[in-house]
Image (cartoon, helix red, strand yellow):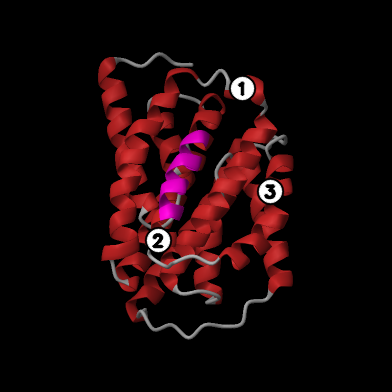
């Protein structure tokens, strides 16, 4: 792993705190943001993958707890996605693809999803007319998103949130709670796929969990209890556009 100076460590920990604050406020673990910060400092994603997944689990756990306590969670819907996603996340974590191809496709999807959410949030209110949940489609989506999560080394919440929002299966803030649970189970699946040997050699990058958890405690307080559904939707859109734009810039270089 690339050795970091004291200044680089300070910048990295500050970046992780900021990412955890904003990502956790919408129920996300922040993997794409952590990987971006690490990449800027010259640390390859392969070296940081396990540390990022562990950080993801902790941040998403804080988010799940906060959203559940605030009444924004649905176990039944999460289970339909998770039962198909976890095995596929384990499978996906064992496969390697071209970094350029994955960044280009994933970056495009996230950016488009973020822009759609940003556009629709102008008319978003707390009173959303929900549509009937269709579990066969949830199984298919769960399998696909789980595989993609394992393949890319992230929890998959950035994929699930906009779909839940656009399908209107749950209220806007409830997407945060479900996404957090989805991230936890898929990140654990990714860690299982990585194996104990890689987990036991995380090294100093495990310190990323400290500012991440502090940022998550603050971020989820605002996301679950203080922000309106409109603000929540706009922050979610900004997170998606940021993650997607970052990947597209990396693919262009």
| Label 3: which secondary element | helix
Read off the residue under disc 3. Answer: 86
Furthest residue to the front? 69
- Name above or below for residue 28 compared with residue 59: below
Q: Where is residue 40 in the image (x, y as percent from the top left)?
A: 38, 30
Of residues 197 and 79, the one nearer the viewer is 79
Residue drawn at 57 percent across, 83 percent down: 131
Q: Earlier in the sequence, mark 3 or mark 2?
A: 2
Q: Which of marks 1 and 2 is nearer the N terminus?
A: 2
- Name above or below for residue 24 compared with residue 140: above
Magenta stretch, overall SS: helix
Q: Characterize the local packing of mark 2: few (<14), some (14-19) or many (20 or more) Cα atoms within 10 angstroms.
A: few
Q: Taking 125 as reference, is 90 left or right?
A: right
Of residues 184 and 149, the one nearer the viewer is 184
Q: Where is residue 48 in the image (x, y as percent from the top left)?
A: 51, 27
Q: How far apart are marks 3 and 1 (CA)?
A: 19 Å
Magenta region: 54-65
Q: Position of residue 41 (x, y in %)?
A: 38, 25
- Name above or below for residue 132 compared with residue 32: below
Q: How far apart are marks 1 and 2 (CA)?
A: 34 Å
Q: Do the residues labelled 3 and 1 touch (CB within 8 Å)?
A: no
- Frontmost of labels 1 and 2 is 2
Q: Is residue 57 magenta?
A: yes
Residue 249 can be seen in this image: no
- Name above or below for residue 69 compared with residue 190: below
Query: Which numbered tag is attached to residue 69?
Result: 2
Q: Characterize the local packing of mark 3: few (<14), some (14-19) or many (20 or more) Cα atoms within 10 angstroms.
A: many
Read off the residue under disc 1. Answer: 198
Q: Characterize the local packing of mark 1: few (<14), some (14-19) or many (20 or more) Cα atoms within 10 angstroms.
A: some
């Amino acid at each position: 792993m690339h050795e970091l100076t004291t200044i680089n460590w300070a910048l990295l920990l500050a970046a992780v705190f900021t990412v955890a604050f904003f990502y956790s406020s919408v129920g996300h673990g922040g993997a794409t943001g952590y990987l971006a910060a690490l990449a800027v400092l010259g640390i390859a994603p392969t070296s940081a993958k396990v540390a990022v997944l562990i950080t993801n689990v902790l941040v998403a756990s804080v988010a799940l707890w906060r959203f559940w306590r605030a009444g924004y969670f649905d176990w039944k819907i999460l289970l339909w996605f998770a039962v198909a996603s976890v095995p596929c996340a384990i499978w996906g974590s064992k496969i390697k693809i071209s970094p350029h191809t994955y960044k280009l496709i994933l970056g495009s999807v996230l950016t488009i999803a973020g822009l759609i959410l940003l556009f629709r949030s102008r008319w978003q209110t707390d009173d959303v007319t929900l549509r009937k949940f269709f579990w066969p489609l949830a199984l298919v989506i769960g399998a696909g998103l789980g595989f993609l999560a394992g393949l890319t080394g992230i929890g998959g919440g950035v994929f699930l949130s906009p779909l839940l929002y656009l399908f209107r299966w749950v209220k806007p803030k409830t997407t945060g709670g479900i996404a957090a649970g989805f991230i936890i189970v898929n990140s654990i699946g990714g860690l299982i796929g990585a194996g104990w040997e890689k987990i036991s050699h995380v090294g100093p990058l495990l310190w990323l969990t400290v500012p991440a958890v502090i940022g998550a405690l603050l971020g989820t307080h605002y996301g679950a209890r203080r922000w309106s559904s409109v603000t929540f939707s706009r922050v979610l859109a900004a997170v998606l556009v940021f993650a997607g734009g970052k990947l597209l810039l990396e693919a262009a270089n």
